[in-house]
């Protein structure tokens, strides 16, 4: 039975890692496209990219894979969390968790849940408006080189004019930072890259990624709120 449990945890960890790396690659693309807002060109470049992402058939098909990957990552993560809990329901009397692991590596489920709550609000703010209802602000569209584009940039400007939204987004980015700080390294290790020659490089790239990507994301609502970009 112990072997069965071990085997199934390994399988779950494998899928967690694979879907985690897939979601990491999404974050790179998402962050790069959104960073076009810093061109400070009234949203022309960003709206062009958002238009491409929203209308390209290949991207729209990949979107289904993205949501499936996200769902699998969440389900697998919850199963691992509860499996670990039931495997050792009573803590050892002498156990001092901080001695053996960092708090954020023990809090992956909590951090993941905070990111999920952030994502529900985020999907309502942007995905729902760009894919279902259309944007809610005026002007709804913008013309660039004669091309009619939905004004998702204007929607961002409007949404990030509210202080509480900016605070929730920044907190979401901080949760993402902590989650990635452990998750990035852990994903590669679970996939077998745990030899000494890879370890340092993975740790370095993982730490840099975990800081840079959430920091760029957090800068977006802040920049809109303080009107650093118009
Ligand atoms: C904090 C700054 C962020 C801003 C300004 C932002 C903005 C946006 C916008 C405008 C869209 C709609 C894009 C479109 O329809 O083409 C979107 C979609 C999305 N965002 Fe974000 N985002 C941010 C952070 C994040 C983070 C940290 C995550 C993940 C942890 C995330 C996950 C997603 C997902 C899953 C979608 C749906 C993808 C799709 O439509 O294919 N976003 N975001």
Image (tube, rainbow, N blue to C red):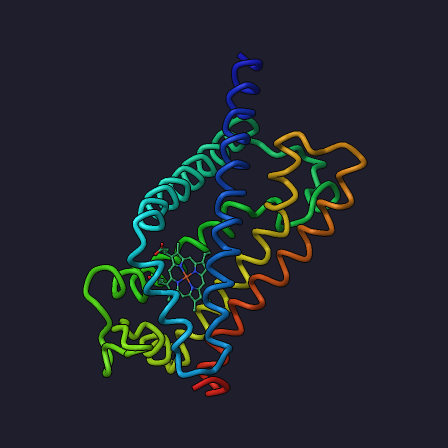
Tell me what residue is drawn at x 54 percent, y 30 percent. 14
Residue nearer the viewer, 170 or 135: 135
- Which residue in the rendered view is the most extreme toward the left? 133
- Quadrant containing the C terminus in the rendered view: bottom left
Residue 170 position, x and y percent, is 50, 69
| Residue at x 37% of width, y 41% of height | 65
Looking at this view, name the residue that lies furthest to the right: 196
Which image quadrant for residue 190? top right
Determine the image quadrant of residue 133.
bottom left
Residue drawn at 60 percent across, 39 percent down: 187
> Where ligand 1 lies, by image quadrant?
bottom left
Above or below, 119 relative to 223: above
Question: Residue 153, relative to residue 9: is it above or below?
Answer: below
Picture coordinates of residue 142, whole percent (x, y): 28, 79
> What residue occupies the far front of the structure in this picture?
145
The image shows residue 96 at horizontal and vertical percentages of 71, 42
Q: Please, is residue 226 above or below residue 62 in the view?
A: below
Counting from the top left corner in percent of width and height, residue 74 is at 42, 41
Q: Nearer the viewer, residue 214 or 47?
A: 47
* Total marks in image: 0
109 left or right of 159 in image: right
The foreground one among 147 and 198 is 147
Q: Residue at x 57, y 48 (%)?
A: 107
């Amino acid at each position: 039975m112990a072997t069965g449990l071990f085997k199934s945890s390994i399988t779950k960890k494998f899928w967690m890692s694979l879907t985690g790396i897939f979601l990491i690659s999404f974050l790179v693309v998402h962050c790069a496209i959104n960073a076009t807002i810093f061109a400070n060109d009234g949203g022309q470049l960003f709206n062009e990219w958002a238009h491409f992402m929203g209308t390209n058939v290949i991207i729209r098909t990949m979107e289904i894979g993205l949501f499936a990957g996200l769902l699998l990552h969440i389900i697998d993560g919850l199963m691992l969390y509860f499996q670990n809990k039931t495997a050792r329901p009573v803590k050892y009397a002498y156990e001092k968790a901080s001695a053996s692991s960092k708090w954020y590596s023990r809090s992956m489920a909590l951090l993941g849940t905070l990111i999920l709550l952030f994502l529900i609000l985020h999907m309502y703010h942007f995905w729902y408006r760009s894919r279902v209802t259309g944007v809610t602000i005026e002007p709804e569209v913008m013309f660039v080189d004669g091309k009619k584009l939905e004004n998702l940039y204007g929607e961002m400007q409007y949404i990030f004019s509210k202080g509480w939204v900016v605070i929730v987004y920044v907190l979401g980015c901080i949760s993402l930072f902590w989650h990635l700080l452990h998750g990035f390294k852990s994903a590669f290790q679970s996939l077998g890259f745990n030899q000494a020659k890879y370890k340092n490089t993975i740790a370095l790239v993982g730490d840099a990624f975990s800081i840079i990507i959430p920091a760029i994301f957090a800068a977006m609502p802040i920049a809109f709120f303080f009107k650093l970009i118009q």
